[in-house]
Image: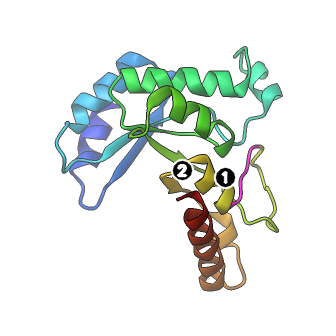
Amino acid sequence: MSKAVSVAAKLPNVGLLTLHASGGTAVMQAAREAAGSGKNGPKLLAVTVLTSFDEATLREIGMSGSIETRAVTLGRLAKKAGMDGVVCSAHEARAIRRACGAKFIILIPGVRPRSGPANDQSRIATPAEAIRAGADYLVVGRPITAAQDPRSAVAAIVDEMKSASRRTR
């Protein structure tokens, strides 16, 4: 893993790299070392709990407690290991922000327009909900790639993000 991070960190235009926080402290610290700590290198984000998981899935894989508790625990572990931030759902973002601080990056996947299908995602949020939850970055995939008019889909999502940003200031 550290070799992959080292190679990816040297590629042009790589700004963010993700790895699983469930790999533990040693894995995240090795990734941090491999990526370097310079200002020009990519930011490292640790995935907490996949947005496709619900409480039953969490228990199925042997994790106890609520999704929020697991996500916050993994967020704290990521911060301690030197990660720049986390990937988490909007549902856990506020709690992670409180636990890890204002400068800790939060990337929220599973973002869907209100009228869009959830697909395989269990814990989704609209673009506005994700912004209000404290997202620094959003991941919006299928609502754009599967849209009849992807350009219009992007424009609508950006408009919603701008509207939410104005309301949170």
Q: Give the answer, above or below, for where 146 lies relative to 12.
A: below
Q: Distance between the residues labelled 1 and 2?
A: 12 Å
The residue that disc 2 covers is 135
**Is residue 25 toward the left or the right of residue 68 in the image?**
left
166 is within the stretch colored magenta: no
Q: Is mark 1 on a helix, strand or loop?
A: loop
Taking the image as drawn, is residue 48 in sight? no
The residue that disc 1 covers is 110
**Is residue 158 toward the left or the right of residue 18 in the image?**
right
Q: What element carries label 2?
A: loop
Which picture quadrant has residue 82?
top left
The disc placed on residue 155 is none
Taking the image as drawn, is residue 92 in sight? yes
Q: Give the answer, above or below, for where 160 lies relative to 139.
A: below
The amino acid type of the residue labelled 1 equals Gly
From the viewer's perspective, is the residue at label 1 or at label 2 nearer? 2
Pick whichever of labels 1 and 2 is earlier in the sequence.
1
- Look at the numbered discs 1 and 2 and tell me whether their residues touch, using CB distance below 8 Å: no
What x and y, as percent, mark residue 54?
A: 78, 34
What x and y, as percent, mark residue 71?
A: 60, 28
What type of secondary structure mainly makes up the magenta span?
Answer: loop
Q: Residue at x 57, y 73 (%)?
A: 158
What x and y, as percent, mark residue 127?
A: 65, 61
Q: Give the answer, above or below, for where 118 lies relative to 95.
A: below
- Range covered by the magenta-colored residues: 123-127
The amino acid type of the residue labelled 2 equals Ala
Q: Residue at x 44, y 33 (%)?
A: 101
Quarter of the picture holding the N terminus: top left
In front here: 111 or 161?
161
The local crowd at label 1, few if under 14, some if 14 to 19, many if 20 or more residues have their Cα within 10 Å, is many
Q: Residue at x 58, y 25 (%)?
A: 72
**Is residue 37 toward the left or the right of residue 30 in the image?**
left
